[in-house]
């Protein structure tokens, strides 16, 4: 089983950006956490982070026929990107959406997620652990199919 783990804009600044919201652990820490989870679950994974919407769209398009599942934290594009939603719908790969913070308890504009219109599950407010939950949820779903 092969998963693509996508992270959107500014997540590369974890540890520096708004630590009261996102914590003090860095993006490198997050990558190591995700890789360790995938190793434990015997899942092959590729991690990709970009600050550019089009690059994320291209990466999703290129996932077709290569990856069995996608875990995505689209970051700010969550709330704006029809293009990322359309790319996910186009490839039809089972997807779980993750957010480190509890987006339902923040500003009004963070309450709506385009990606949620496609993702079969959205995990919010669990920090790094949300990615581990997403990976395990995706694995269970694919094993059931
Ligand atoms: C985020 C929440 C988004 O609203 C925000 O723009 C992010 C990170 C999260 O992980 O909590 O960049 O996706």
Image (spheres, helix red, strand yellow):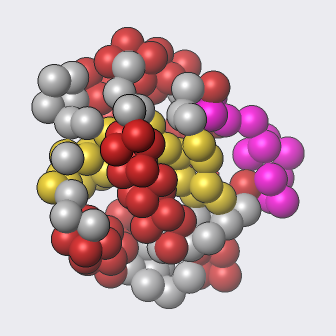
The location of residue 131, given as percent across then percent down, is: 45, 63
Query: Which residue is at a point 67% across and 66% down the rendered structure image?
Result: 125
Tell me: residue 117, above or below residue 136: above
- Which corner quadrant holds the C terminus? top left
Rendering quarter of residue 102: bottom right
Viewer-side residue, 64 vs 19: 64
Read off the magenta span: 104-116
Query: Which residue is at a point 53% across and 53% down the rendered structure image?
Result: 98
Is any atom of residue 81 visible in this view?
A: yes
Query: Which residue is at a point 78% across and 43% down the rendered structure image?
Result: 111
Of all residues shown, which one is farthest toward the front? 144
Left or right: where 130 falls relative to 145: right
The location of residue 39, given as percent across then percent down, is: 20, 71
Tell me: residue 42, above or below residue 78: below
Is any atom of residue 83 visible in this view?
A: no
Query: Which residue is at a point 42% across and 50% down the rendered structure image?
Result: 140
The location of residue 100, given as percent across then percent down, is: 57, 65
The location of residue 143, given as percent across then percent down, is: 34, 44
Left or right: where 42 falls relative to 34: left
């Amino acid at each position: 089983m092969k998963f693509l783990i996508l992270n959107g804009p500014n997540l590369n600044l974890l540890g520096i950006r708004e630590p009261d919201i996102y914590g003090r652990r860095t993006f490198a820490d997050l990558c190591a956490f995700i890789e360790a989870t995938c190793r434990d679950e015997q899942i092959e994974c590729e991690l990709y982070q970009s600050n550019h919407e089009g690059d994320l769209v291209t990466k999703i398009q290129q996932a077709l026929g290569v990856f069995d599942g996608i875990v995505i934290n689209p970051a700010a594009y969550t709330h704006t990107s029809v293009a990322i939603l359309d790319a996910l719908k186009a490839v039809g790969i089972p997807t779980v959406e993750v957010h480190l913070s509890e987006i339902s308890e923040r500003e009004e504009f963070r309450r709506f997620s385009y990606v949620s219109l496609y993702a079969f599950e959205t995990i919010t407010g669990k920090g790094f652990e949300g990615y581990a939950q997403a990976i395990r949820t995706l694995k269970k779903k694919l094993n059931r199919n």
